[in-house]
Amino acid sequence: MMEMNKQRLALLRWIGKEEERSYLEVPFTVEGPVERIDIAYRYERGGAAGTVVDIGLRSPERVVGWSGGAREAFFVGTEKATPGYLAGPIVEGEWAVLLGAYKIPEGGAEVIVEVELARPHGRWMKGDLHMHSVHSDGGYTIEQAKDSCKARGLEFMALTDHNTSSQNFTALSPDEQLLLIPGVELTSYFGHANVLGAPDALRDFRVTTSGQADEVLEEVRERGGFVSLNHPFCPSCPWELGFDVPYDAIEVWNGPWRALNERALAWWQEQLAQGRRVIALGGSDTHRDDRFVKHGRPTASVWTEADTAQGVLAGIRQGRVVLQFDPDETCMALASGEYGIGDTIPRHAVEERGGVPLTIDICGAKGDRVALWSDRGIEALWDIAVPASAAEAGEWEAEAAEVGGWTIQREIAAIMAFDAAEDKGCVPVIPAGAAAEFDVIAPRMVEAENGHVRLRFQGSGDRLFYRLEARRTLEGLEQSVVTCMTNPVYIARAEDTGA
């Protein structure tokens, strides 16, 4: 039976008394690409006869794992697996579920084995692209960081300790729930940059000039590293080596939303409006347990075609990234037909459709104002209303309510106070860089249904891009925080070749 890229098999094996204390195989065939195999089995356990049947798995090449009688289900994937099993490429050919007939009653025992084969498919995965551990100046061991990320509902994490790659080699063992993205944060006296995707791409971090940065970052990219300039407008450690060095992305969102992120967001919008395609990323920059700085704040949601670290990196390289305040906070998607976030709509598609018809999907918004941006500025605004009876507090809001009588308003105000005193005024309600006609754009009130809103907008083919940004401003505060933002859907220009 086929369902949503999954093939399910139900296999029956009768074990006779004469087969007791032997190892049996229940074969099945893997054909075509498969990224994960899930196995579950059941039989009449215990009883007077004390039936015990153990389980394991064989690939066409070798035994890849054994549970004995300790588990009723397990899985193996390309880079993740249940403890006791080896992750790795799932090759075509004959596989077999191994059954250990340890104790079998006189009348025999029926074992039902369920096999599910998951084929590669596109999906959104949530993770954190910036964090530190005891391998540099962090307080978390790698296992503690992994546990924290899993508790927050994340599916991947990037270990980016300062100027060292030792954390990547310590974390080589596959995890059952998390993909581990290798990384390092190049940390110089003149700025920081994440190098993602290669365990040991950075050989020397001692950069003091733009010329040296050119050489080091170019070598990093040649060795497979993806370069993101971190918190470039941070008051204490800004990027001072210029923006003409080789890099792939900018960390627009570092930790809780605050003034340094507003500056990075405004700068990024300016670059996009000038025709530069720069990928926007975010990461928590978590070092230790903290009231506001948490793994997954912000969360990077990445569209990936494979449940692998390199699959996530491929999605990032294509700009298929949405940033959220928290894993369970507002999330948005933007598409024009088959073209989505990170894609370029070709000219023939623009001409055939008479412009750029956009579909906007919003989940989890609670009083957010959603802005549709282009290179011309803000083109449309929607206020998302949620009935009080249907509103569920996000994790950060629930935590805020539990700590010393905190309210949502106080939480946001406290996050704003996270900044240095001189930066508090840099968080506007109406973001910098908005179109001059912003004052005449009337927000449209839209009510969410079951937490979801779908909007449509007829975009213009003479724009360079469209992107989404959601903000939440609460009563009594003159400040707002970004709850979600997307990377752009780009529009090919008439002069672009091959469009």
Image: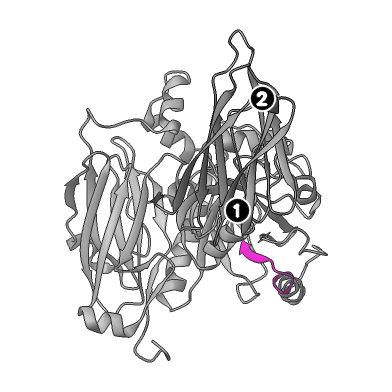
Spot occupied by residue 106 in the image (x, y as percentages of width and height): 63, 16
| Residue 128 appears in the figure | no
Above-or-below relation of 247 to 15: below
> Local crowd at mark 2 within 10 Å, few (<14), some, or many (≥20)?
few
Look at mark 1 in the image and give the residue it sits on: 235
Q: CA distance from mark 2 to mark 1?
A: 54 Å
As drawn, is 343 to the left or to the right of 96?
Answer: left
- Answer whether residue 94 is magenta in the image: no
Closest to the observer: 276 or 358? 358
Please state the extent of the stretch shown in magenta in the rendering. 221-229
Above-or-below relation of 71 to 286: above
Count of marks placed on residues: 2
- Asked which secondary structure carries label 2, the reply is loop
Look at mark 2 in the image and give the residue it sits on: 70
Closest to the observer: 251 or 313? 313
Asked if the residue at tag 1 contacts the one at tag 2, i.e. Cβ–Cβ closer than 8 Å, the answer is: no
Spot occupied by residue 12 in the image (x, y as percentages of width and height): 52, 35
Spot occupied by residue 269 in the image (x, y as percentages of width and height): 42, 67
Mark 2 / mark 1, whichever is N-terminal? 2
| Residue 200 appears in the figure | yes
- Asked which secondary structure carries label 1, the reply is loop
Write down the quadrant of residue 42 in the picture.
top right
Identified by mark 2, the residue type is Ala
Identified by mark 1, the residue type is Pro
